[in-house]
Amino acid sequence: MDAENTGNTENASEHGYIHRKDDYLKRLRRIEGQTRGLQRMVEEEQYCIDILQQVSAVTKALHSVSLGLLDEHMRHCLMRAAAEGGAEAEAKIKEANDAIARLVRS
């Protein structure tokens, strides 16, 4: 999701994950390939437990990406906002709490 869709006004160059962007893209492409593999498994009517095992692997990979991005956000965006204080800090804390809540529910 881009900054425009989230209401976030930061420039992309200010996001904490930028220094690892290529790594994140590589991991997401790998997950995309795993997801296509799942589709193939269903098309080929493979054994349900084997499919579920692969679903679990994709889920774990997505959680790993999510936790990495959350860590980057907290170390960069949240810490910067906290140092500045005020309404921006409160907004970033709420934003981080909301993101954590979504991850916990997933």
Image (cartoon, grey):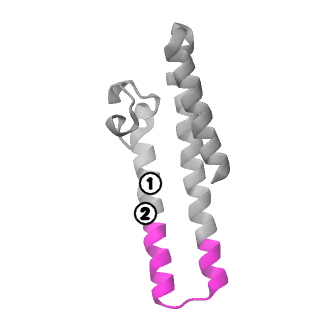
How far separated are the C-alphas under marks 2 and 1?
6 Å
Q: Are marks 2 and 1 in contact (CB under 8 Å)?
A: yes
The residue range painted magenta reads 33-54
Q: Quadrant of residue 98?
A: top right
Question: How far across and how far down the image is residue 63, in percent?
Answer: 60, 51
Residue 14, horizontal then vertical, whole percent: 38, 24
Where's the N terminus, which quadrant? top left
Q: How many numbered circles does the render carry?
A: 2
Task: Examine the residues drawn in magenta and state their main secondary structure.
Answer: helix
For the point 51% across and 8% down, the residue is 84
Residue 90, placed above or below residue 51: above
Disc 2 marks a residue whose amino acid type is: Glu
Which residue has dot 2 on it? 32
Residue 35 in the magenta stretch? The answer is yes
Q: Position of residue 48 (x, y in %)?
A: 63, 85
Q: Is residue 42 visible?
A: yes
The secondary structure type at the circle numbered 2 is helix
Residue 80 visible somewhere in the drawing: no
> Which residue sits at x=58%, y=31%?
96
Please tell me the numbered disc located at residue 28: 1
Q: Position of residue 34 (x, y in %)?
A: 48, 68
Q: Which residue type does callout 1 highlight?
A: Leu
